Image (cartoon, helix red, strand yellow):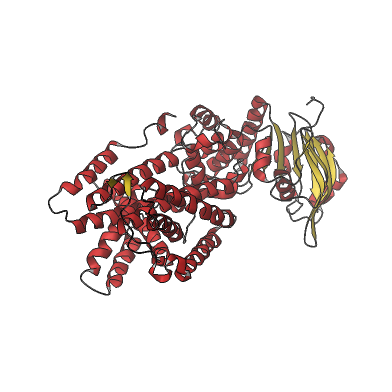
Amino acid sequence: MSKASRPVSCGAVVVFAALAALPLAPFMSKYYLLLAFDALIFGAIAMSLDLLMGYTGLVSFGHAAFYGLGAYAAAVLLERGVLSLWACLGFALVVVGVYAWIVAYFATGRRGIYFALLTLIFAEVVYTFFRYTQTFGGSDGIQGLPEAVLLPGVPIDTPAKKYYLVLGYLAVAFVVCRVLVRSHFGKVLVAIRENEDRARFLGYDVQRYKMGVCMISALLTGIGGALYAIRAAYATPDLMLWTESGEFIISVMIGGLGTLVGPIIGGAFFTILRDKVSSYVDWYFIVIGLVLIGIVLFMPRGIVGLRSIMRIRS
Amino acid sequence: MTASHPVLEVVAISRSFGALAALTQVSFAVPEGAVFSVIGPNGAGKSTLFNVISGLHAPTAGHVRFRGQDLTGLPPELISRRGIAKTFQITNVFPEISAFENVRVAAQSRASVSGRLPSLWRLPDVDRTVMQLLGAFGLEARRDELAQNLSHGDQRYLEICLALATDPVLLLLDEPTAGMTPGETKAATTLIQRIARERGLTLLLIEHDMSVVMGISDRIAVLHFGQKIAEGTPEEIRNDPAVIEAYLGGADD
């Protein structure tokens, strides 16, 4: 018990405090606040995906569907005048939960590439459904959503409020993930990653564990999607495109597998890099691609892996 | 359960893979607290027998009973929960976590929190159990080494630690001394025997090397081409003409 009782280090608290003070900085325009929002939400989702990739050894190519479904769930409510943030999040949890249960049920029975492909195929089906269903706006999605309210009469209407919303989400998701990976459950996930068959012979029903972690990762991602719809005032099928899933995976890789903090940094790094490069050149994906290839080749343990390398050299 | 009740009964087990009959009508019973060995040349069906008992393969025919309960066809995780642990012929541990974490994940499977909702946020304290086991096999000093960096012999011991950490009634050992030098084999055999006695374990041992089992077994069954050709005390087996024929006449060992 003692080791699990303090899941958040002093360093993490300092970083969160610094992030909380960020909107007070003079250079933080509306534009930068929204970029910071996108960076943190991408980081939080990459962290959720790390539960699967880094800890359990399962690669999901379908996280965009959890993200997009969360966004659509919130958008459908906002469009109909249900403005409560909590209703939007609750509905997103239900919708994503049902879908994730179905995907997890079928995908966790398979291993390796089959798991990855099943998550991808399910996500493509969901994408296609929203892309061609006029009730949900087809390829335009649901646009022009009203502002959500935190409590009746307290609208989430400024970039700073939205930023604090996503920071709160990141903090909660971080604590959830940290507690989880240090728990009994988290230790079994690592055992499954290391040697699934051996874990079965120790008495673990590995599919149950895999389904559990898929659900938790999907639900955290779905909340992120709902918050994105609230910030952007739209939900479009592009949020569910497989390239989006690919970007989540890349963020985990460049941050560092199995570290939680790494993927947050990776997701934020990726978002900011994309934003900066695309404001200068149209062919920004070539530049980003080269940077990412460099990171994967020369920093196989990701950005946070650098820390241990420097420690050895010094 | 009475003392006279065998811990494990294998009743007329057959298992075929396509046209190949790996096991044909094999039966035996292992009494409580005994050291029972199954020997036979390579390819005799020993590992298949273990895979059937531990739930990896369902038998084509026959039954496995453990303390009077039918286990036939249960998956490995449920058989493990009933109290049967297995070690593997080819070392099968968790390579990229420490020796300590290896044994911890095995030991925590029997903590009361395991499989219940609070296991999502609680970590049961099994440190004492883990250190006792590592200590029994001389691995305390290497507790923080990654399993893959341990020497071959230490990995074999870690393998046994994992099985013992699940607190079994019956331990299936599949060639526990595979790849060890004769000196290591002797030390390992003595150690296993001592620990089994201390814990009141029943042992079912697979070996292809007769010399290993002769000294420690209460009873031995001999498999040859998937059939049981003899069963008895080590002395009886040593003098059994069918066994001598199987080992010396044309077998690949």
In the image, taking residue B153 as reference, residue B58 lies left or right, namely right
Q: Where, by quadrant of the figure, is residue A181 drawn?
A: top left
Q: Position of residue B234 (x, y in %)?
A: 79, 36
Is any atom of residue B92 visible in this view?
no
**Residue visible at 62% across and 39% down?**
B185
In front here: A256 or A301? Answer: A256
**Residue visible at 82% across and 34% down?**
B233
Q: Position of residue A167 (x, y in %)?
A: 29, 46
Q: Eyeballing the image, is A119 above or below A191?
A: below
Q: Eyeballing the image, is A228 above or below B181?
A: below
In the image, taking residue A71 as reference, residue A95 lies left or right, namely right
In the image, taking residue A176 as reference, residue A279 lies left or right, namely left
In front here: B245 or A194? Answer: A194
Count of number-bearing discs: 0
Q: Position of residue A87 (x, y in %)?
A: 41, 47
In front here: B127 or B219? Answer: B127
Give the position of the N terminus of chain A as an image quadrant: top left
**Residue visible at 34% across and 58% down?**
A254
Is any atom of residue B240 visible in this view?
yes
Most extreme residue toward the right is: B241
